[in-house]
Amino acid sequence: MNIRIVSDEREFLSLKDDWNRITQDLIPFQRFEWIHLWWKYFGKDNDLQILIVKEGDTISGIAPLFIKNMRFLKFLTIRKLCFLGDGIAPYSDFLIQQNQNREQVFQSLFQFIFIHLSFDMVGLSNINSHNPHFDLWQKYTDLTNLKLELTYQCPKICLSGYTSYKDYFSQLSKNHKQSLKFRQNKVMKSGVDVEYVFKRDITEEDMETIATIHVKRQKFLHQKNVPGRFSYFADTKKMAFLKDYFCRCNHESKILAYMKFDGSPISYILLMASKNTLFYWNTAFDNDYAFFAPTKLLIHELVKYAFENNFTYLDFLRGSDSYKLQWSNDMSVNYQLTLRKTLTARLSYLYKSVVPEFLLPKKLKIQPLE
């Protein structure tokens, strides 16, 4: 068993077949198409540090890593080790062939990082408690006195315990069912033509439509002083990445659900799909139709769709929002492994901890190189 570092774009591209062989039963966010496209858009000024484990002539493990070069103050650069996909992918992990050598491969990758890679700090985020190797993350962080910090709860619906949608619906809370019925009646009385659409052939026009809805919704929430509001679609580079992925890559792994009033979308859910799981990646509704609770009605149809198409899970991903919890019956948790290795990293953390954010001049904040 040997490990080498892939730091070259051409060699990264050559990993496609082995990468997808190892991840064939994993989530779309860990497949080569998502990760490589992400690097194409967001890799500038950063350094590939993909670790490859070979047993004989076969690749049996991949650590999809890179160094994010971050500027601190005016003259210092901090090298932060991250997972590829950082900032957009909801879950990340080592990619390891599931066999009797799984732990040996994991241990080799884990130790190689801290012995051979050069960085100022580690920020390996979105390590999910339902990942296939989470037990090993727990074991080897404990053995090395490192700590996994809880960052997000991730609610989901496990559908396998129910014989049908009707069976699942019967166990929802009385208040939730009454609220759903109330909104359905309001829609019916409005006299509009209601349509629910599930499509895999997502177009650029679709992406522009949902971007408009999402940005409008986030601006509304921001004006209401709801903290932490942002939109991927308001960022030119992220919008280009999302268009490229959702409109051009394999249609089988993506689904766009619409709720339409008289032919016009008023709510959407953008999903990823694996063999047995739907991933609820992004959603919004038009504020002009808030009274109808369109997202609630669309989720209702989405759960039906999941049953009809034999999915086992509907994963709401990061964030324990109340609208997610009222549908969910299962939960996982995201963790982050953080280490400030060098004095520069520790000083930057101390500086930002002591000085209030609003007092920091923009040029003194830690920022990705641009």
Image (tube, helix red, strand yellow):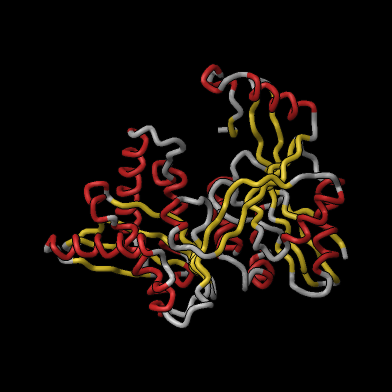
In the shown orientation, is residue 64 left or right of residue 27?
right
Q: Quadrant of the N terminus?
A: bottom right
Name the residue rendered at 29%, 57% in the picture: 294
Q: Quadrant of the C terminus?
A: top right
Q: Is residue 244 visible?
A: no
The quadrant in which residue 261 appears is bottom left
Where residue 34 appears, as percent x and y from the top left, is 55, 59
332 or 137, which is in the foreground? 332
329 or 336, which is in the foreground? 329
Callout count: 0
The quadrant in which residue 140 appears is bottom right
183 or 235, which is in the foreground? 183
Where residue 192 appears, as percent x and y from the top left, is 14, 63
43 or 198, which is in the foreground? 198
In the shown orientation, is residue 185 left or right of residue 196?
left
Name the residue rendered at 72%, 47% in the picture: 148
Question: Which residue appears farthest toward the left when viewing the image?
Answer: 191
Name the residue rendered at 64%, 28% in the picture: 71
In the shown orientation, is residue 216 left or right of residue 152?
left
Q: Is residue 230 visible?
A: yes
Question: Which residue appears farthest toward the bottom when viewing the image?
Answer: 163
Where residue 195 appears, as percent x and y from the top left, is 23, 68
Name the residue rendered at 53%, 58% in the picture: 155
